[in-house]
Image (cartoon, rainbow, N blue to C red):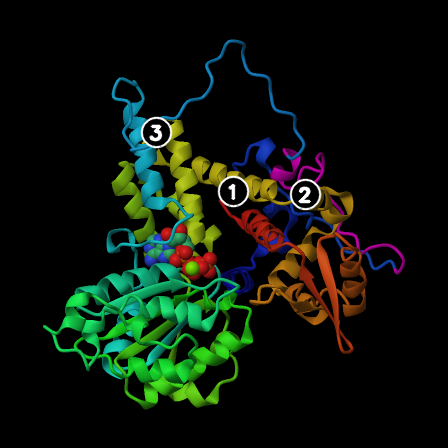
């Protein structure tokens, strides 16, 4: 995970020097101290205590978003008009509205930087020239199948969409499908076959009745078929090249599906068919996604997605700048870059919120204050999206005093399956605590319905965060604490 690489290399004095924990410039309400300001006690019966305190010694240490957790909503003035939409469903902003230009810019910012959708067109796609070139090279020059892998939100689907657009321009027939947990080989590939015109089958002459009927390849499949029969059919594709994109391949639960896809890849390669597969999925390495499949190793290329560079982050932000006619100050850009750790998802989430904060302030320059507001907002939203029970677990005293341990655990658990052991946490803590104490303290959070799950694999104890959102929240809290002026 990006966070892990990044936080290891950038662990700064903030974790060693208590006074650096309070990011200067934070208002009192948004001050944050992850509880690193004390020393550890090695008392054998109580928890390892990270004494809570702040630089001025007057306030209790806790992230600001936890402070606001249980606050009652303030009562607004009476007779205040109820909130209304600022634009119609067709995205037209009421022109009589005095704030219409502002509303339009907010909508434009959302379209440019909204983080909930993958990029589907080149105009909103930043950077990634090398990845796109590599992908094209694999398909066009090497004629292999490709597996795009990387962590969640790193931009796999966006790359696949932009690649599809580029390939269609070169007259490839590109078929896109997203895998679900219930994916079945024959249903999924029958649907793909139903989108390949029969005209492209070598047995069909261009002006024949079959070609005129507008049938598709699915009509040539038996009711039940496997990878071999499908490869036989696909080997007869002529007059075009077909690319089948299987997105979210990691979600498929059925091992038979993966086995059949591997078999299909093998058969397509053996027959030099004009059909190539591009698989994408969350994984840290190729094996994790396709399993141990030596028979197809020669026929596939793994394409790992790396974190965005600082220049690419700037490019993403620039797309928002143009769309909403705003400018991000160098400080705001630096803040987003540091907090996002190369994740395009986080870059957009933070830059969007920071831009919105500026526009709401009626400013055309996004500054550091808006950046901080965005981070607080994201943390608060993430926290609010967790079940109440988990929010309460995070807010309790024990979690507060063990904040560094929990953050180290979150870093340690950044592998694709989320599991980590005591040794991983020991490393993340820089060897400052003994493994038995770490194990004991982690177990305090591993009760039923608590923050961690505990699994015993043979003689080894492994932990995992029960809700993945908790580790993201802890990591961003830690990153926020590390921010220097
Ligand atoms: N090159 C890019 N330029 C601009 N925004 C990007 C780029 N790549 C990804 N994004 C944005 O980052 C977010 C995550 O991207 P995307 O959905 O493609 O990632 P993913 O790796 O497929 O995620 P998941 O693992 O959840 O499937 C989206 O908001 C998307 O718009
Ligand atoms: Mg995706």
- Name the magenta segment's main secondary structure: loop
Which residue extends farthest left? 207
* Mark 3, secondary structure of its residue: loop
Q: Which residues are magenta?
A: 44-68
From the viewer's perspective, is the residue at label 3 or at label 1 nearer? 1
Foreground residue among 279 and 354: 279
Which residue extends farthest right? 45
- Ligand 1's image quarter is bottom left
From the viewer's perspective, is the residue at label 2 or at label 1 nearer? 2
Residue identifier under label 3: 363
Q: Which mark is residue 213?
A: none
Q: Residue at the spot x=58%, y=35% of the render?
A: 30
- Contact flag, marks 3 and 1 (Cβ < 8 Å): no
Residue 373, percent from left and from top: 49, 36
Quarter of the image where one finds residue 255: bottom right
> Which of the two discs, 3 and 1, labels the residue nearer the N terminus?
3
- Contact flag, marks 2 and 3 (Cβ < 8 Å): no
From the viewer's perspective, is the residue at label 2 or at label 3 nearer? 2
Residue identifier under label 1: 378
Foreground residue among 61 and 238: 238
Quarter of the image where one finds residue 248: bottom left
Within the magenta stretch, is there residue 48? yes
Q: Which mark is residue 391?
A: 2
Quarter of the image where one finds residue 160: bottom left
> Which of the two discs, 2 and 3, labels the residue nearer the N terminus?
3
Residue 297, percent from left and from top: 42, 86
Q: Residues within 10 Å of mark 3 (few under 14, many from 20)?
A: some
* Mark 2, secondary structure of its residue: helix
Foreground residue among 262 and 421: 262
- Residue 191 shown left or right of residue 8 in the figure: left
* Distance between the alpha carbons at the discs numbered 3 and 1: 21 Å
């Amino acid at each position: 995970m990006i966070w892990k690489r990044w936080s290891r290399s950038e662990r700064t004095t903030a974790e060693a020097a208590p006074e650096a924990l309070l990011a200067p410039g934070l208002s009192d309400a948004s001050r944050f101290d992850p509880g690193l300001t004390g020393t550890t006690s090695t008392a054998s019966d109580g928890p390892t205590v990270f004494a809570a305190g702040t630089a001025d010694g007057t306030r209790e240490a806790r992230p600001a978003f936890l402070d606001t957790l249980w606050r009652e909503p303030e009562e607004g003035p009476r007779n205040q008009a109820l909130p209304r939409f600022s634009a119609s469903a067709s995205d037209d902003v009421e022109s009589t509205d005095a704030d219409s230009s502002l509303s339009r810019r907010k909508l434009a910012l959302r379209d440019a930087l909204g983080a909930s959708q993958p990029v589907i067109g080149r105009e909103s796609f930043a950077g990634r020239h090398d990845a796109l070139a590599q992908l094209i090279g694999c398909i066009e020059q090497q004629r292999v199948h490709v597996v795009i892998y990387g962590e969640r939100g790193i931009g796999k689907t966006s790359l696949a969409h932009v690649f599809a657009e580029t390939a269609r321009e070169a007259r490839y027939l590109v078929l896109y499908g997203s895998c679900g947990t219930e994916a079945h080989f024959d249903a999924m590939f029958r649907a793909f076959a139903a989108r390949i015109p029969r005209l492209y089958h070598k047995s069909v002459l261009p002006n024949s009745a079959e070609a005129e009927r507008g049938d598709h390849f699915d009509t040539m499949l038996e009711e039940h078929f496997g990878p071999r029969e499908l490869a036989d059919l696909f080997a007869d594709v002529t007059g075009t090249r077909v690319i089948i994109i299987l997105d979210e391949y990691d979600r498929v639960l059925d091992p038979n599906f993966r086995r059949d896809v591997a078999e299909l890849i093998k058969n397509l390669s053996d027959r030099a068919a004009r059909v190539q597969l591009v698989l994408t999925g969350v994984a840290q390495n190729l094996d994790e996604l396709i399993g141990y499949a030596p028979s197809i190793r020669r026929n596939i290329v793994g394409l790992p997605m790396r974190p965005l560079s600082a220049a690419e982050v700037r490019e993403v932000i620039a797309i928002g700048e143009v769309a909403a006619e705003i400018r991000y100050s160098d400080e705001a850009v630096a803040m987003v870059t540091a907090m996002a750790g190369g994740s395009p998802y986080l870059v957009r989430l933070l830059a969007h919120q920071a831009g919105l904060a500026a526009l709401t302030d009626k400013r055309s320059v996004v500054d550091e204050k808006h950046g901080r507001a965005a981070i607080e907002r994201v943390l608060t939203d993430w926290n609010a999206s967790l079940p109440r029970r988990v929010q309460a677990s995070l807010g309790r005293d024990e979690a507060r005093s063990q904040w560094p341990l929990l953050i180290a655990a979150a870093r340690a658990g950044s592998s694709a399956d989320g599991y980590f052991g005591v040794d991983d946490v020991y490393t993340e803590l820089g060897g400052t605590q003994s493994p038995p104490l770490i194990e004991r303290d982690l177990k305090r959070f591993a009760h039923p319905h608590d923050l961690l799950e505990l699994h015993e694999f043979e003689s080894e104890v492994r932990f995992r965060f029960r809700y993945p959102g908790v580790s993201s929240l802890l990591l961003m809290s830690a990153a926020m604490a590390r921010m220097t002026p």
